[in-house]
Amino acid sequence: MMKTEWTPQTCEELLRNYRPAKIQGSRLQFEGVGDKDVYNITAPFWNEGQWYIAGRVEERESEDSEIVFFKAKQGKDGPWLCDPDLPRFRLQDPFITKINNEWILGGVQLQFSEEPEPKIEGWKTVLYSGSTLHELTHIKSGPWNMKDIRLTELTDGSVGFFSRPFGVEGHIAVIGFNVIKSFEELSETIFLYAHLFRDQFVKEEWGGANEIHMLANGILGVLGHISQRDEDGRLHYHAMAFALNPWTLEKTELKIIAVRSDFPPGPAKRPDLVDVIFSGGLTREEQGRALLYVGASDTEAYRIDIPDPFLEYEKLPVVVPISSV
């Protein structure tokens, strides 16, 4: 069911309805970056006759990251080899899509304080565009201290965008959404004028959109994350999904689709990141299945075979752009 307003459920409440995966996910192998960690990856995407993944690459003790493109050596089953012919970007947490047949790559740019002890002072989402991955150039930026900006082309050719502002009426962070006529209308300030969904998270928890899927009925399937910090300061990030009608702003309730324990144990960048997965992307497969790609504990990347979380949303009525009514 879709409504314009819901009573938010806590992570704990959502987890009560979650059934753990029957088969744990598998770790992805990356080559060509030495002993650096690769995590918070995109889902595989088809480019110039090959499967590619973009990943966040960094030293274990550092937050100074690069986005690196990896190409598949043996199909989507990996391993994944760094492509030295493609550009690298000093950014975190890549996402990629196509709008008007142009690649749109995004990532998070950090602002560091001065030496000798550089610390993170702020961040912003930056966007690159190009007809090929070789030609990506910087074109847009979001406002300072906003992550989880995501874009999608809609059925009438307009563009929907998601935002994630902090501190809205006592909320840690909420998801926002708006529609613009074209990609050219994007600006740093327009992300501040999205419709805000104050009914998805309780004020002490937060989340964001990670990847957008246009479903067969014109509804948007949103892959994202929901997060909380416990009394001991430990973070808990879970993969979630919901559906959104971009024209009426009706949406479904959130549902959790994967948790850290669905994957093998592994190292964590810090002790407070043990129970963290970050939804990178998802590919819809045959027979009602999907492959979900995640970063885990800020050190590794995994994929897992799960029921397609968007199938139930495609049973909802077809949506029609407001401009067509």
Image (cartoon, grey):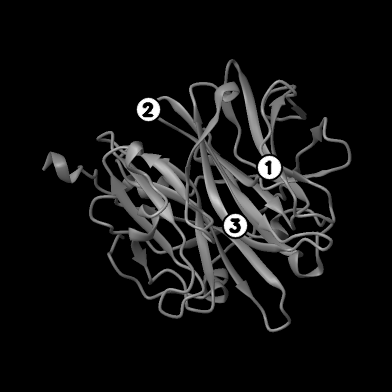
Disc 3 versus disc 1: distance between alpha carbons?
Answer: 12 Å
The answer to whether residue 215 of the structure is visible from this angle is: no
Q: Amino acid at mark 3?
A: Trp
Q: Earlier in the sequence, mark 3 or mark 1?
A: 1
Horizontally, residue 300 falls left or right of residue 183, namely right
Residue in the image at 73% along x and 82% along y: 232
Residue at 80 percent of width and 59 percent of height: 115
14 or 204, nearer to the observer: 204
Q: Position of residue 269 (x, y in %)?
A: 80, 59
How far across and how far down the image is residue 260, in percent? 70, 59
Disc assigned to residue 123 = 3
**SS assignment at label 2:** loop
Classify 172 as above or below 246: below
**Relative to residue 88, is residue 93 depicted above or below?**
below
Q: Which residue is mark 1?
A: 90
Frontmost of labels 2 and 1 is 1
| Element marked by disc 1 | loop
Image quadrant in which the C terminus is located: top left
In this rendering, position of residue 283 left or right of residue 231: left
In what element is the residue under mark 3?
Answer: strand
Label 3 – label 2 distance at C-alpha: 28 Å
> Considering only order in the chain, which callout, 1 or 2, is on the residue closer to the N terminus?
1
From this viewpoint, is residue 265 visible?
Answer: yes
Residue occupying the point 54% across, 74% down: 205
